[in-house]
Amino acid sequence: MTMFMRQLGGELRKLFARKRTYIGFAAFLGVELVVLGLLRLPKVQRGLVRLLEGAGYASSEYLSGLTLGLMIMLSTVFLLGALYLALVAGDVVSKEVEDGTLRMMLCRPASRGRILFLKFCACVIYTAVLTLYIALTALAAGYLHAGGGGLFVFAPTEGIFAIYEAGRGMGRIALGIPFLALSLCSITTIGFFFSCLKMKPAAATIVTLSVLFVDTILKNIPFFSGIRDWFLTAKMSAWALVFEYRIPWEVMMEQYAWLAALNVTLLVLGYLAFSSRDFKS
Amino acid sequence: MSPMVSLRSLYKSFGQRPAIEDISLEIPEGEIFGLLGHNGAGKSTTFGIMLGMVAPSQGEAFIAGHSVQKSRSQALAGVGAIFETPSFYEYLSGWENLRFFVSLSGQDVPRREMEAAVQLVGLADRIGDPVKNYSHGMRQRLGLAQALVPRPRFILLDEPTDGLDPLGIREMRGMIRRLRDEFGITVMLSSHLLSEVEQLCDRVAILHRGKMVFCGKWKESPDLWQFTVEPQERAHEILSAHGLKLSRDLWSAPGEFDPAMVVEALVRAGVQVRGVQPVRQTLEDFYLETIRQ
């Protein structure tokens, strides 16, 4: 176990020592500030006030740091999160193959399965750290701009319209973050799977993004509304259900079980493809 | 005593094209063994199979008695390797790279052992620098350092002098010798610098188009002689009758060759002998000759 932790530490060091990681983190902060700027526009503010007051709630209380933070978080994850995770996970094996560092690793007694597992664990930790970073910076930005107050959640595609007092709102966000990270792990796994195949790192990233893009488009075509829940991105949205007044745990568990099954399948397929490859330039 | 390395009937094809065919050889402990061949001759495929990176279509490779194909972790437990050009994480320091690769050995290696390897390859002053600032020679040294930790029983070096300047080549040669002489490490290496191989290796194997065309001590190959004679046709008959074989103006002699007796036979047959001299055959001559045949 100590050896595994040491090896995992090495993998994490590789991920977190790259300048690119911090440029990415800075980009997330930049996008969050842009979203915050957009949310401050009078036209957008008027729409939010109308929505809240139309339902009988005081906008001054619920257009708070929590509400803005959640909005910023959702927009940032949607705009940049998928792209960044696809980039990181798509690179994790294939870039090392391309650079020749994987060959150096494979000269060692560690099995291919172990090397892949270490890399996958590092990717999952990276996903969790990124999610936490996005959430914390988004909430900080929201608080700095709007201060404290209750939480207002409006997610029409998930059928959620909810209002919470500050404490409960914060609790729901805290509960949602790990589930959001779990959802994002599916993007990581898809990227990781393609990275295990014999393809260039850029190709692995593009294919991963294409899968998500096509899935999102298909999900939003009205003809497919009856099977909307079948789509990957719909299952990934299950984390938003923590904002329902009565959390539908059975629905969430079902959706996450699907995602887990998909992830395990992709990992096994990735491992089989990786194991059967010859590594020689 | 079982050999350190044993390759048994290795065969590998990529698609329809065979990369290596029926490669079998053994390397006893403590030997420096050279694997020679043109680009594409099958050296990297052979090394790849020995490290478990390439799956053979047939055959098996054994290191220290363990099958690489069946129990890779055990087989590679005492192996250090530089396979093709050593590559590192450019943004990490030499030390961080070393620590990472060593962690994959699965052994708890004391820091002083890593420091000793760094010292041995002469990188102690620069080990804390990012690898992106390293010269090619320094990368080769770091490659060797990572191959030496934890202390291997067998080390496999693919083109260890590739891209090094003459001083670097000499130092690398010295280091490889030390590995065998001081630490008893068995070494297998490939190189295009035949003069290096000539100075270092006890035995060599020559691969040509995927087939092993020679394996042994090249110095035990037949001696070469240059005969300056007239008329040549008659001389050729006499020399051939004495078991000598002509190739590229030189005659290769069988083991029991007595030059005085052959000269006497030539003179008796009316051949004018102007000169007879042995030609020292370099490994390069031998290699080219073997490939040509």
Image (spheres, rainbow, N blue to C red):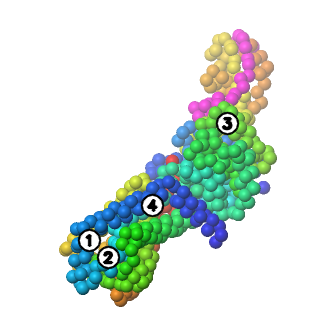
**Mark in the foreground, 1 or 4:** 1
Looking at the picture, how far across and down is residue A189, in whole percent? 43, 67
Cα distance between the residues tagged 1 and 4? 28 Å
- Name which residue lies at 20% across and 73% down: A222
**Label 3 Cα neighbours within 10 Å, binned few <14 / some 14-19 / many ≥20:** some
Give the Cα distance between marks 1 and 2: 9 Å
**Label 2 CA crowd tier, 10 Å (few <14, some 14–19, many 20+):** many
Name the disc covering residue A82, or none: none
Q: Name the chain letter of the residue that bears numbered label 2.
A: A
Q: Mark 2 points at which residue?
A: A63
A254 up-or-down from B265: above or below: below
Q: Which amino acid is tagged 2?
A: Leu
> Could you tell me if the residues under marks 4 and 3 are in contact, i.e. CB atoms within 8 Å?
no
Distance, label 4 to label 3, CA atoms, is: 42 Å
Q: Which chain carries label 1?
A: A
Q: Earlier in the sequence, mark 1 or mark 4?
A: 4
Q: Do the residues labelled 2 and 3 touch (CB within 8 Å)?
A: no
The chain under label 4 reads A
- Tell me the quarter of the picture where residue A77 sits: bottom left
Q: Nearer the observer, disc 4 or disc 2?
A: 2
Callout 1: few (<14), some (14-19), or many (20+) C-alpha neighbours within 10 Å?
some
Magenta part of the chain: B268-293
Name the side, left or right, on which B44 lies relative to A80: right
Q: How far apart in space, not on screen, are marks 1 and 3 (Cα)?
A: 69 Å
Q: What element carries label 3?
A: helix
- Vertical placement of B16 versus B266: above or below? below
Disc 1 + disc 4, Cβ < 8 Å: no
Residues flagged by tags 4 and 2 on a common chain: yes
Q: Which residue is located at x 43 percent, y 55 percent?
A: A201
Q: Front-most of B236 and A46?
A: A46
